[in-house]
Image (spheres, grey):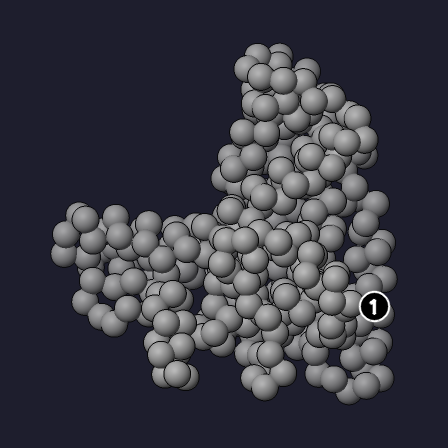
Amino acid sequence: MLLQIFRNMDPLTDPVIYAIPFFLIAIGTELYINWKEKLELYEKKEALSSIGMGIGSLIIDILTKGLAFGTYTIIFNHFHFFNIGWHWWAWVLILFADDFTFYWHHRLSHEIRVLWAAHVNHHSSQTMNLATALRQSWGEQFYKYIWWCWMPLVGFEPLMMLMMMSLSLIYQYWVHTELIKKLPAWYEFIFNTPSHHRVHHASNIRYLDQNHAGILIIWDRLFGTFAAERDDEKLIYGITKNIETFNLFKIASHEYIDLGKDVHRAPKFSDELKYIFYPPGWSHDGPDLTARNLRKQLKNKEK
């Protein structure tokens, strides 16, 4: 049964395959502008490590996406409440359903340390360019599809779901750039843009854990995680404690190692659990360096 399910998942239906030439052309264009204008948007070794992380993530995703498709198909075939189908309006519904799911998956990947240990890879680049978009997590691929399991249950077709996830991934590619400044106000209000996503990748205290949007920025506005890019503060990319390495395995594993060390030194079992499930920056014996507390301190200082 599972083999038959996997056979039904034609890889040529994945929009990402057809977007690869666009990705390459876009990087080439950005590199040319970077060279011509002497912008210093790229650091060679960092860009290569981002591409390497992307290739590794793609290899892992071949397996995990197949397992996800099989799981979604079993849920849809045996447990769905409705059958939404492939109507035009189903694409509107799935856009909102997928993007809402991505928002919470992404937000919690910043707010729960064991999830951050997987996601931090994407934020470890100290430059912001289209190569950074390819710096995808290896660890996330093993669990991220779980967040979408509710969708086949309510009646979304599994293949449609994976296609929508790929379309979202394609959209999120172009927002990783400094070349595009602000877009029209109406677009900035509804959609994720390079301006919004630069904020998300910044390690400035006021910007930590903000703008988790995939396609629609409305979720951040609704749930209190929106921050607008300011002209009076230079964006500093990377993480609060940069790892200073281009080694792919260190990039992929460094936060898991740090998490393990913190769990090991925790005096109580309850503290071990807190290190795992509390936000990054929590400590049983040190200052509260969680993003929420740091932003609160900054806000009080600026009053």
Label 1: few (<14), some (14–19) or many (≥20) C-alpha neighbours in 10 Å: few
Q: Position of residue 137 (x, y in %)?
A: 55, 53
Instruction: Name which quarter of the figure residue 213 lies in.
Output: bottom right
Q: Secondary structure at mark 1?
A: helix
Left or right of 280? Residue 41 is right
Q: Where does the N terminus fall, quadrant-wise?
A: top right
Q: State the residue lying farthest toward the left.
A: 267
Determine whether 269 is above or below 211 in the image: above
Q: Position of residue 273 (x, y in %)?
A: 25, 48
Residue 245, visible in the rendered structure: no
Q: Position of residue 70 (x, y in %)?
A: 61, 23
Instruction: Name which quarter of the figure residue 236 lies in.
Output: bottom right
Residue 139, visible in the rendered structure: yes
Q: Which amino acid, by three-letter code, is at mark 1?
A: Gly
Q: Which residue does the image show at 39% across and 52% down from the upper left?
A: 112
Q: Where does the C terminus fall, quadrant-wise?
A: bottom left
Left or right of 143? Residue 171 is right
Q: Which residue does the image show at 74% across and 44% down from the upper left?
A: 167
Q: Position of residue 57 (x, y in %)?
A: 61, 49
Instruction: Name which quarter of the figure residue 226 lies in.
Output: bottom right
Which residue is identified by label 1?
A: 28
Determine whether 68 is above or below 204 in the image: above
Q: Nearer the viewer, residue 228 or 66?
A: 228
Left or right of 155? Residue 140 is left
Left or right of 267? Residue 168 is right
Q: Which residue does the image show at 82% across and 64% down from the upper left?
A: 26
Q: Which residue does the image show at 67% across and 69% down from the upper left?
A: 195
